[in-house]
Image: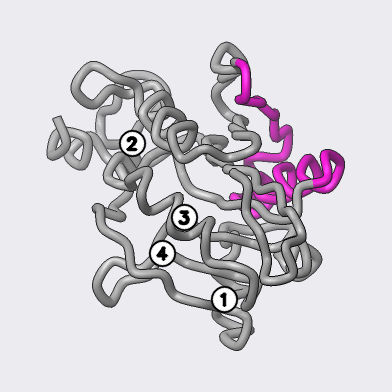
Amino acid sequence: MRLFSPTDVRMTVCGVVLAAGAGSRFEASGGDGPKPLATVDGIALVDRALAVVVAAGFDEVVLVDGSTNLSDREAPGVTVLHNAAWSEGIATSLQVAVAHARAVGHEAIVVGLADQPGITTDAWRAVAAALPEPPVAVATYGERRGNPVRLAASVWDLLPTTGDEGARSLMRERADLVREVPCTGEPWDIDTVEDLERWS
């Protein structure tokens, strides 16, 4: 995704799909197999998420796996990274993505989850296009904040390194850094089999 600041400095932006968790609530509710591979209309959740993000036109798309090996999803334009510390919380998956973005030279990442089939390509594009300041942009659905979230490189060092919050703690503590971006779509997670059935 070729994005430009008012000074015409080219920015490269990476779309990030987090899919590292064990999905314990899904399993406890009777889920059969890993949650990222559960299907809606015959398509695995992780594949639906990747298709949406790839269609948004990012410079690169990164998928972070952990509990479930998703390395077979690697494809041209899609990089799969493994988070060996996935059990320590979603913040560790975000850190894996940030480390990769730094190494590659991206100036921003736009982050979402694999288990939210109602997030649209338009939402990813809208959040990615919220340039250049403030450095954090978050999708909103009505009065509710959700995914995806855009994080410029200037705030990466402010993100938590462990725990079950990604950018949420940063947005809570530094409201001055955040812009809300109204989006269409459904921001709900699939946490249980019942949630999955509502989408099928």
Classed neighbour count for the residue bearing mark 1: other residues with Cα under 10 Å, few (<14), some (14–19), many (≥20):
some
Q: Nearer the viewer, residue 156 or 5?
A: 5
Tags 4 and 3 in contact by the CB under 8 Å rule? yes
Kind of residue indicated by mark 2: Phe
Left or right, 31 with respect to 84, comes to left
Kind of residue indicated by mark 1: Met
Q: How far apart are marks 4 and 2 (CA)?
A: 25 Å
What kind of element bears circle 4? Answer: strand
Q: Is residue 174 above or below residue 166?
A: below
Kind of residue indicated by mark 3: Pro
Classed neighbour count for the residue bearing mark 2: other residues with Cα under 10 Å, few (<14), some (14–19), many (≥20):
many
Q: Distance between the residues labelled 1 and 2?
A: 28 Å
- Bounds of the magenta segment: 76-105
Classed neighbour count for the residue bearing mark 4: other residues with Cα under 10 Å, few (<14), some (14–19), many (≥20):
many
Which residue position is annotated with label 1?
171
What kind of element bears circle 2? Answer: helix
Which residue position is annotated with label 3?
148
Q: Which residue is found at the position 66% from the left and 26% from the top?
A: 79
Tags 3 and 1 in contact by the CB under 8 Å rule? no
